[in-house]
Amino acid sequence: MMNNSDDLDRLPWLSRRGLLRRGSMLALAVPGLSLFLASCDRKSSDKSEKGNNGSDHGSGMSHGDAAGAGADMVTPQIAAQAPSAKLTRFDPQLPPPPADGVLNLNWKSTELALRISPNTVVPAWTFEDNIPGPLVHCRVGDTVNFTLTNTTLMPHSMDFHAARLDPKTAFRSVAMGQSHSYSFKPGRAGAFLYHCGVEPMLLHIGAGMFGALIVSPKDPLPPAREFVLVQSEYYLGAAVHGVQPFVFSKMLSVSPDMVAFNGRPDQYSRDPIRVKKGERVRFWVVNAGPTLPCSFHVVGEQFETVYLGEPPASAIHGVQTWAVPAGGGMGFDLMCDNAGEFPFVNHAMGHGQKGAMGLLVVE
Ligand SMILES: [Cu+2]
C-alpha cells in the first residue's frame, strides 16, 4: 500500500509532476472533474485513516461530469505510444484452471494506447494492459485471491460477477498508487463478467475495463475445445495525435462505431479460430456491453447445447441463436461434424457488421 507522495514519486509509471500536469489538464477539459478528483483525494485519505472500508461503487461522478470526457483522454504519453502500438491477436483459448485450487490475481489498472484495428488506436483504460483484461478460469469452490493496484490518476475498482460479496467493501474504488485486495470462492459455475464499477460505469466499461472469469463445475462438462469471446462496443471520436478518444455522449446514445469480440473488431475473420473435425467446441460468450446484447449464432451450424444458467443445469438443446445480455455470460456447445469455414456472428447484423464476427475453421 502506497499512501504518501514520496512513495508515489518512486513509482516507475507515475511521477508527481506528471500527475499534477495530467490532473490540471483533465480538470480543464472535463467539467466538474477537479471537484471530483479533490473529493476522491479526500475520500482516499479518509479511508487510509479509517481502514479503507469506504466505497463509491455505484455512486459518485454524475453523467454531466463525464459528458466532456474524450479528447482529453489523449494525453501526451498516450499520443507518444500511438505510433508503436501494434495490432495483436487476442488469444481466445480458455486457460486451464489452477491445479491447486487457488487463483492468485495481482493486477494493475493502467492507461495506454491500444491498437484495436489496423487503423484504430484508442486511449484504453485497462486491467493488465489489454482489452479485455486477462481471461481467467477456475472451478466451483476454488479460492480467488485478487489485488488491484491502480497506476492511473482515475480511481478504479473491480466487480467480479462470480463473487457474492458486499460491493461497498469488496468492490470499492482504489485511488491512484493504492492497492486493494479481497478473496472469494465462486459458488456457481458459469461465464462471468468482471468490470470496473467506478461511476460512471458506462465510461469505465466503455473505455475497456472488463474481462471474463469462467467457473467450471466440479463435475466436468463433456471434453471440448473451449474458447472465450467477450463482446464489447466502441464509441469513438475523431483522431487526436493518431488516437481516437472514447466519446461518452455516444455511449449514452448507444451508437457504437465498432463492436468486437475480445477487443478487436473482426480479428478472428483475419486470423480464424481453428479446430479439428469431430471436436466439440464450447464458446463461453461473455457480454461486457456496456449496453447492447449479443445474439450469438454460428453460420452453417447449430448449438447442441446452450447453458443459460449454471452448467450443466439450465441447458437447452438444438438452438440456432441465443442472446447474451450486457453483463451476462453463457456457454454454447457445438459439434464440429462438418469441415468448413463457419462464421460466428452477433446476428443482430447492424452490430455483427461493425466487427462482432469471426471465423471458426473446421479442418
Ligand atoms: Cu475504472
Image (cartoon, rainbow, N blue to C red):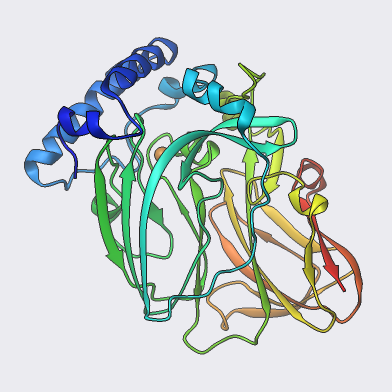
Q: Quadrant of ligand 1?
A: top left
Where's the C terminus, which quadrant?
A: bottom right
Q: Is residue 199 above or below residue 66?
A: below
Residue 291, percent from left and from top: 59, 43
Q: Residue furthest left?
A: 49
Residue 107, percent from left and from top: 38, 52
Residue 315: quadrant of the picture: bottom right
Residue drawn at point x = 39 percent, y = 72 percent: 186
Left or right of 50? Residue 8 is right
Residue 262, percent from left and from top: 64, 51
Residue drawn at point x = 72 percent, y = 44 percent: 265
Residue 296 visible at all: yes
Q: Is residue 301 above or below residue 279?
A: above
Residue 253 visible at all: no
Q: Is residue 310 above or below residue 179?
A: below
Left or right of 182? Residue 91 is right
Q: How many marks?
A: 0
